[in-house]
Amino acid sequence: MALMRSAGLKNDASLAGFLAGGIRPVALFFAVYFVLSVAMRLILPNGLTLDEAEQALMSQHWRLGYGPQPPFYNWVQHAIVALSGILLFSLALPKFLMLFLCYVFYGLAARELSKRPDFVALAMLGLLALPQVSYMPQQDLTHTVAVLMAAALFLYGLCRTLSRPDWQGYAILGLAIGIGSIAKYNFVLLPAATLVAVLCDREFRQRLLDLRVLLTAVIALAIILPHALWLAQHLDLATSGTISKMVDARASHGVLRVLRALASLVLACLAFGALAVLVLALPQRAMIRPAWATGDRWSRLLGRIMLVSLAGVVVVILVSGTTKITERWLDPYLLPLPLYLLLKFQHAGADLDRLLRRLAPLFLAIMVISLLPTAAKTWSAGLTGAYGRINMPFDVAATRLAADRKPVLIVARGMHLAGNMRLQFPQVPVVDMVDLTEGAAPPPSAAGPVLVVWVPPEQNGAGPDLPAVGQRLGRYPSATGLLELPYHFGRGGPMWKLGYAWLE
C-alpha cells in the first residue's frame, strides 16, 4: 500500500510529486536554491560581513593554521581565490557549495537506511527545519558550514559502512573524520560518540574488527596531521578564541556555574531541534505515541550517537569551566535528528507520502524566509536606520583613495576593515594593524606609499598611533584625512566615516 501511494505521489505534477522522486530531484531543487542564494548575495553591495571579511583577508596566504579556527574552510577559500581571484563570487561560492553538499550527503545517508524515495526526500528537506542548517548560514557563517558538511558526510560513511561494508565506506569515514576535525575542533566528539554507540550493538561492532578500519585511520590521520603539527606549537592561539566564547569570567563558580552551563545546554538543544520536532511530528500527531514506543536498530544507533555526544558536552562543561553552550556548538551532534525522527515514524507505520505532500509548501516557505532577510535588511536600511556591514560603502571609499595614489601595502585597523580593503584592492597586500604592531606581519618589500585606514570611534574620531605604525614600516605620515560617505541605500541619515593616512 505504501509503495502504491508513493507511486501515486511521484505521478503528481505538484512540487511534492517532483520531490517524491528521491535524492536526484531534491538535489536539483537545492542546487537551484543555492544558485539563487549566490545570485542574491551578488546583487547586494560588496561590503563584506564579518566572516566574509575574515576569509578575504586570510585567503592571501596558505598556512597550516590561522588562529582560533581550524583551517579547512580557509584552505578551500584560498584554493578558490587562487583560481578565480578575490571576488565577491569567490567568497560566496564555497559556503553555498558546502551547504549543497551537506544536503546531498545527508540524502545519501538516508538512502542507505531506506530505499523509499519519499523517506530520502523528507530526510533532506527535514534539514530545513534545523535553523542552524537553513537560516543561520544564509546570514554569516563559514567554519560552521564546513563542519555541517563534514558531519553529513560522516553519517553517509557510517551508514554505508554498517549496512554494506566495503572499502569505499571506510574511506569515506576517514575522509569525513579528517575534514571534520580540521573544520571545527568540537567535531572530534562525534566520531568518539559514534564509537561508543556502535560498540553497544553486537552486529555493528563487528565492523570495528574489519582490517579496512585501518584505511579509515590512515586517511583521517593524513588529513589531520599537517594542522596537528602546527597546533602542537600554537595551542594557546588556537584555543583562546573558543574558550573566551564559552567562558564568562564574571560568572559564578562551583555548582552555580555548572547549573548555568547545563541550562544553556538544554536551551541550545531546544533552539537547535525544537522546530524539526514540531514540523515532522505535528502533521501526524496520532503517530507520536507509537513512534515514541518503537524503533529499529538504526534509530537506536542515531539516538545513542546524539545522547553520547551530549554526554560528552556535559563532560566538557564539568572539566573546562564552560559557562555557556550555544546551539551552533551542537551542529555535528544533533544533525542526525531529522533522520532519527523519520526512522521512528516510518517504523511506526506513518504515511510518509502524505507527510511529504503536507510539508512541501512549508519547506518552500522556510527556504524563502531564510533567503530574504539579509537582502531585506540591506535594502530597507535607509528606512529603519539599521545599517549593516553590507551597507558600508567600501567600494566608493576605495575609488576615492585610489584616485590619490597607489599603495604598495594597506594597513587596516581590524579584521573586518582589512578584509574589505583586500576585496577592493585585490593586487595590494593587506594586513591587520594588530598583526603589524605585534610583529606578525612583515614590512612591505616594495618601495612606495603605505595606506593606513581605520574606522573612527564614535566619540572622538581618534585614529591609530601612526608614529608607531610608521616606525614599524620605516615610513612617516605625509597626509591624513577623513572620508564621510553615505551608506548604500541610505536616505540622508548618518554618514559612514573612514579615517586614512599615507605613509611615505
Image (cartoon, grey):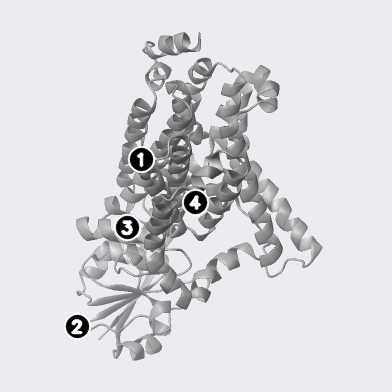
Q: Is residue 143 visible?
A: yes
Residue 66, quarter of picture: bottom left
Of the image marks 4 and 2, the number of the one nearer the N terminus: 4
Q: Which residue is mark 2?
A: 446
Residue at x 39% of width, y 47% of height: 172
* 344 versus 474 height, above or below: above
* 10 versus 252 height, above or below: above
Q: Nearer the viewer, residue 437 or 498?
A: 437
Residue 242 image point, x, y percent: 55, 65
Which numbered disc, 4 or 3, marks the residue closer to the eye? 3
Q: Is residue 255 left or right of residue 88?
A: right
Q: Which residue is mark 3?
A: 77
Marks 4 and 3, how far apart in space?
30 Å
Of the image marks 1 and 4, the number of the one nearer the N terminus: 1
Which numbered disc, 4 or 2, marks the residue closer to the eye? 2
Looking at the rendered structure, which numbered label has been put on residue 295? none
Q: Are marks 2 and 3 in contact (CB under 8 Å)?
A: no
Which numbered disc, 2 or 3, marks the residue closer to the eye? 3
Q: Which residue is mark 1?
A: 37
Which numbered disc, 3 or 1, marks the residue closer to the eye? 3
Marks 2 and 3, how far apart in space?
27 Å
Q: Secondary structure at mark 4?
A: loop
Marks 4 and 2, how far apart in space?
41 Å
Marks 3 and 1, how far apart in space?
18 Å
Of the image marks 2 and 3, the number of the one nearer the N terminus: 3
Q: Is residue 448 left or right of residue 187?
A: left
Q: Is residue 133 left or right of residue 435?
A: right
Q: Are marks 3 and 1 in contact (CB under 8 Å)?
A: no
Of the image marks 2 and 1, the number of the one nearer the N terminus: 1
Q: Secondary structure at mark 2?
A: loop
Q: Which residue is mark 4?
A: 386
